[in-house]
Image (cartoon, rainbow, N blue to C red):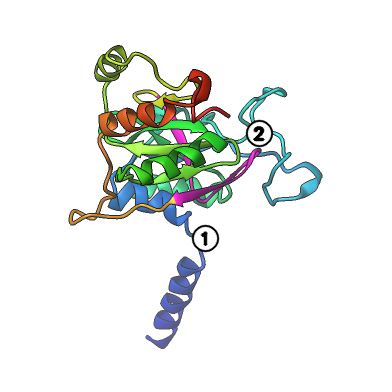
Amino acid sequence: MREILGRRRRRKLRRSERPAPPGTALTCATAWQWPVLPGVGLTTAGHDPAPGPGRSCACPDPECVVPGAHPFDPGLLAATTDARMVRWWWQIRPTAPVLLATGGSAPCALSLPALAGARALVALDRMGVRLGPVVATPTRWSLLVTPYSLERLGELLYAKDRVPASLRFHGDGGYLVLPTSQTGAGEVRWEREPVTGRDGRPWLPDVETVLDALVVASSGAPGGGSRLAY
């Protein structure tokens, strides 16, 4: 009996030593019900396993414009909230970026170039606009919002005389890299961390509220330009 118990203890120890997936991936999938998948990641040129700026993408395209920061294998449609799949993915690819599949029941986002995004946050704070999570990369900042359909987005944009030209929309069929990930452009971090509500999920503002505020913040610059220019 002692030998059996001893073997059980050793097996339990081995299980506990298995690498855990990034906290963001598992939290998104299980607690927040946000579908995620691993990004393609970066090459390990020179046998250096540490990802960082300047590294090339692990995909076959030698001129990839978003190195490490896009789906490849698995594809975007594989995004899931299943904890077992998430654990398996990051056990075999522990340094893979965490990708959120936007749209559907998952958050969507509006993004701006990094400099314009920093200016936008200052302007929206002055206006008293409550923001949700904000993802910052060295090149772009993304403001997460409630899910929206392409039809609703079209109606919102049609009603505007103008919108910042640097604004991008991440809805159905899109994706975002989430913290804490490393891509060829550098580190992905939270500029504004998620604040969970009573349901245990992050609070998100409505897309119309954020879009209206960004349009107001971008107007009125001298010479008719945009305050969110970059």
Q: Quadrant of residue 62?
A: top right
Asked which secondary structure carries label 1, the reply is: loop
Magenta residues, dominant SS class? strand
| Span shown in magenta | 174-191
User: For this view, does 208 lie left or right of residue 25?
Assistant: left
Q: Amino acid at mark 2?
A: Ala
Please, is residue 173 above or below residue 143 in the view?
above
Q: Residue at x 49, y 25 (%)?
A: 226
Residue beneath disc 1: 19
Residue beneath disc 2: 58
Q: Residue at x 70, y 43 (%)?
A: 53
Image quadrant containing the C terminus: top right
Question: How far, Cα to Cα, is label 1 from label 2?
Answer: 22 Å
Dot in front, 1 or 2:
2
Residue 185 falls inside the magenta stretch: yes
Q: Name the N-terminal-most of marks 1 and 2.
A: 1
